[in-house]
Image: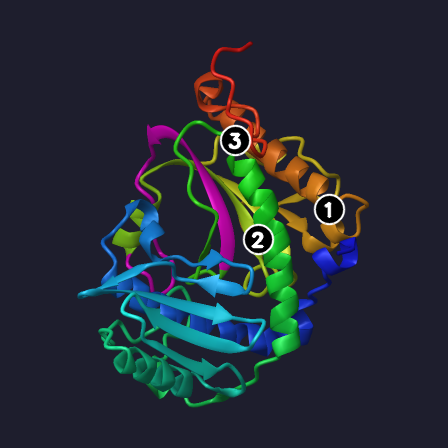
Amino acid sequence: MNRTEAWPEIPFAEWRESAAALHLFLQIVGKYRLARSPWVNHSWHATFYVTSRGLTTGQVPDDRNSVEVEFDFLSGRLRVSTSGGKESVFELGRMTVAEFHGQFISALASVGANASFHGRPNELPEAIPFAEDTRERPYDGAAVRRFHRALLSVSDVLQSFRTGFLGKVSPVHLFWGSFDLAVTRFSGRTAPVHPGGIPNLPDAVTREAYSHEVSSAGFWAGGGPIEEPAFYSYAYPQPDGFAEAMIKPGAAYFDAAFGEFILPYAAVIGSAEPAAVLLDFLQSTYDAAATLGKWDRQALECPMGLPGKPRDVLGG
């Protein structure tokens, strides 16, 4: 696969409405996982994971069965399967949010899963109940597949970056509320109470998510505060001098209104080595957060992992 195929162009304006539909479809399935899974710190129990074919909930405990829900973007289908061998599949395509919600409820019921969960979206200005959202939404399958291809390449880099940390670090996962793929490192110290205020999200959830100091980075498809696909990196709490830190590459900048470093996706895919450019951004923004925040870097960091090679703990 060449560089252009591995890092495709995904101009947000061309699939904005399809992206909005996919976001809401993910929220519906994410709400099911949230309702069935025991709470894990920072809402890690509710996220999606990138797969070779799309996005998955992973194992969801549901009464006597385990259930997995997969968005298979390659075939354009949503698949609900259980440990008991039952499966229900329906096509992804142009439809209303209410229609997707109804089909998903039916799919869960057909495999014997518990189909009850919260029926409104989170982290969006308008929280129209899923069952009442009857505006027809487009679904551009080709654009979704390009987005998935980008997620695969971004996930590979985030997974590599994740290996260079011995402290507490999140999985590489997609949050369906904010629709971003993220990885987060923790200093180990508690953080000031977060002020909350995220639209249609209980402040208790936000405060638990930011209970400890973080350096977090990830990827958005676009929309909201950044109207283009982009990478971001932030620290909470933000240490003094963070916004003025020298960050790589040159195309990265600090968005004062947003309070985060931003690197346009176009700057990454337009380079000769997209993965290396993205790693520079991830490492330099983390360096700024950890150094200015006075993290115990000697205790928390290690060389990035290599396939088949155990970490050298003896220093030989």
Please report whichever mark, 3 or 1, sits nearer to the chain's N-terminal start.
1
Instruction: Please tell me which residue lies in front, 74 or 243.
Output: 74
Instruction: Please tell me which residue lies in front, 128 or 109.
Output: 109
Helix, strand or loop at mark 1:
helix
Q: What's the residue type where badge 3 is placed?
A: Ala
Give the label on residue 274, or none: 1
Q: Is residue 50 left or right of residue 205?
A: right
Region in magenta? 180-202
The x, y position of residue 165, in whole percent, is 48, 29
Q: Is residue 22 left or right of residue 10?
A: left
- Of badges 3 and 1, the one in the foreground is 1
Instruction: Please tell me which residue lies in front, 101 or 20.
Output: 101
Query: CA gap, disc 3 to disc 1?
Result: 23 Å
The x, y position of residue 277, in whole percent, is 71, 41
Q: What's the residue type where badge 1 is placed?
A: Pro
Image-quadrant location for residue 158: top right
Please report whichever mark, 1 or 2, sits nearer to the chain's N-terminal start.
2
The x, y position of residue 225, in whole percent, is 56, 60
Query: Which image quadrant: the N terminus?
Result: bottom right
Helix, strand or loop at mark 2:
strand
Instruction: Please tell me which residue lies in front, 50 or 176.
Output: 50
Q: Mark 2 = which residue?
A: 219
